Image: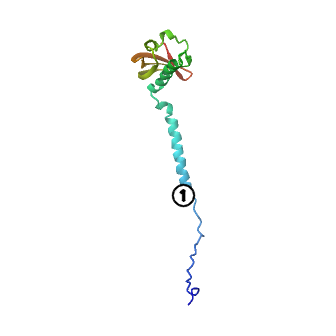
Amino acid sequence: MSDAEETVEEPSVRIEQNEARSMWPFLVAAGVIALVVLGIVIATLISPVEKNVTDKDLLSAPAGNFIKARSDTGKDDLSYACKGFDDNNSPLKIAADAGGPISFDRLTEPKIDGDKATAQVTVSAGGTQSTSTWHFTKENSRWLVCNA
């Protein structure tokens, strides 16, 4: 016998493809995704991000910006102060008298009442810390530092 005569034929497998495929798995997956997205939208409407911010967070940013603007530039940057701000009554006056750059340490006891707020702000300058009551006013959706 030769090699050509010894080949064995393998049976061919026939695959039936007459069955119609269902769209149900796709529709169920699309429905689940739609429900998840709808849940996220409803949760966002019920509890907006603005409500997750504490009073301390709302006032720390403008206090820090005010200190940074006054300490870094060495000039009167009024963009973080309310209208009619008086530098002679500035909450930074004590720290500025100590000399050196002024840094924001912490804000405690924030109290917000409508568009007015107060907080205890601690700053450092010249190696000493000072804490004083700062006043804030909300103007055009921004909290600004005020004298009173």
Residue 40, visible in the rendered structure? yes
Q: Secondary structure at mark 1?
A: helix
In percent of width and height, residue 86 lies at 52, 10
Q: Please state which of residues 105 and 112 is positioned toward the viewer in this rendering.
A: 105
Q: Which residue is mark 1?
A: 25
- Residue 17 is drawn in which quadrant? bottom right
Which colouring convention does the figure follow? rainbow
Q: Position of 56 compared to 69: left or right?
A: left
Residue type at tag 1: Pro
Q: Relative to 67, say whether 9 is above or below.
A: below
- The quadrant of the rendering that contains the N terminus is bottom right
Question: Residue, x 51% and y 42% (percent of image)?
Answer: 40
In percent of width and height, residue 131 lies at 40, 17
Residue at the far top: name it: 88
In percent of width and height, residue 61 lies at 49, 25
Residue at the far bottom: name it: 1
Q: Position of 18 compared to 98: left or right?
A: right
Question: Residue, x 52% and y 39% (percent of image)?
Answer: 42
- Residue 107 is drawn in which quadrant? top left
Residue 120, visible in the rendered structure? no
- Disc 1 crowd rating (10 Å Cα; few below 14, some 14-19, many 20+) is few
The number of discs equals 1
Q: Please state which of residues 7 and 54 is positioned toward the viewer in this rendering.
A: 7
Q: Relative to 72, say whether 97 is above or below.
A: above
Q: Please state which of residues 60 and 136 is positioned toward the viewer in this rendering.
A: 60
